[in-house]
Every structure is written in structure tokens, then in C-alpha cells.
Amino acid sequence: MDGDEKFALVLPRLYNYGYVSDCKKTVRSREENMPDSVYKVIELIGSSADSWEKAASNAILTASKTINDIRIAEVVEMDLIVEDGKVSAYRTKLNVSFKIHGQE
């Protein structure tokens, strides 16, 4: 299963939880309304004992405690930790963008 297939599996569920909006549509509409804006992209890896969706959510919720204006999260990779033949954790790698604020 390649990255696009994994993204296709998790994205609808992330929509339902309200963590991700229609990325392409959102990016286009924001680009039209954000002249002279600067964004930084960082990589986060969230984990959960329950699901990839919760792993992504955990990454965003934790990062949002110290990072303001998180705008978009893109699922890059998903993997599992297996112990004794059983899944012990789900991990989701995200590219997360947030707005850099200048002196306004």
C-alpha cells in the first residue's frame, strides 16, 4: 500500500473527527486570501494505542498547546508497532503548517 492509498483510507475518518478539511480546496481558498503570508512546515509523529486517526489527533492536539495558528496537516506516512505478533501502537507522520507572524 503506497502513501496515497494510506491517505485515502485515513482522510475520510479525519474529516469526520473535524481534524482535516478538504485540503486542496482549503489551500486554494486560503492562497487567494493570504497575500504576503509566511508559513513554516514541520514534521510531527503522533502515536496511539487505538488508531491512526487518534495518533494524528494526538500529534495536533499536543502541538497546538505550544504552536499557534496551525493551518493544515498532511498525512505523510502511517505505520504500526508490533509486539509479540500484536499491534501495540499506531503511528501517523504529519507535515503540519502554521503561520509565522511578523511584527504587525
Image (cartoon, rainbow, N blue to C red):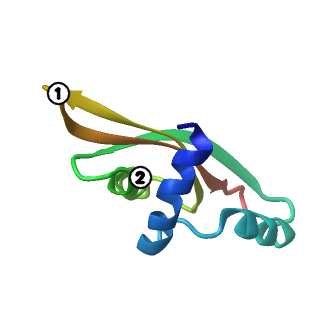
**Residue 63 image point, x, y percent:** 42, 51
**Residue 5 image point, x, y percent:** 57, 47
Residue 75 seen in this snapshot = no
Relative horizontal placement of residue 52, taking residue 50 as reference (left or right)? right
Residue located at (71% from left, 55% from top): 102
Residue located at (13% from left, 25% from top): 84
Relative horizontal placement of residue 68, taking residue 40 as reference (left or right)? left
Residue located at (79% from left, 59% from top): 37
Mark nearer the viewer, 1 or 2: 1
The residue that label 1 is drawn on is: 83
Relative horizontal placement of residue 68, taking residue 99 as reference (left or right)? left
Q: Quadrant of the C terminus?
A: bottom right
Q: Secondary structure at mark 1?
A: strand
**Residue 38 image point, x, y percent:** 75, 52
Q: Are there few (<14), some (14-19), or many (20+) residues within 10 Å of tag 2?
A: many
The residue that label 2 is drawn on is: 56
Residue at mark 1 to residue at mark 2: CA–CA distance: 21 Å
Of the image marks 1 and 2, the number of the one nearer the N terminus: 2
The part of the image, by quadrant, that contains residue 16 is bottom left
**Residue 97 image point, x, y percent:** 62, 51
* Three-letter amino acid code of the residue under disc 1: Glu
Q: Are there few (<14), some (14-19), or many (20+) residues within 10 Å of tag 1?
A: few
In the foreground, 87 or 104 = 87
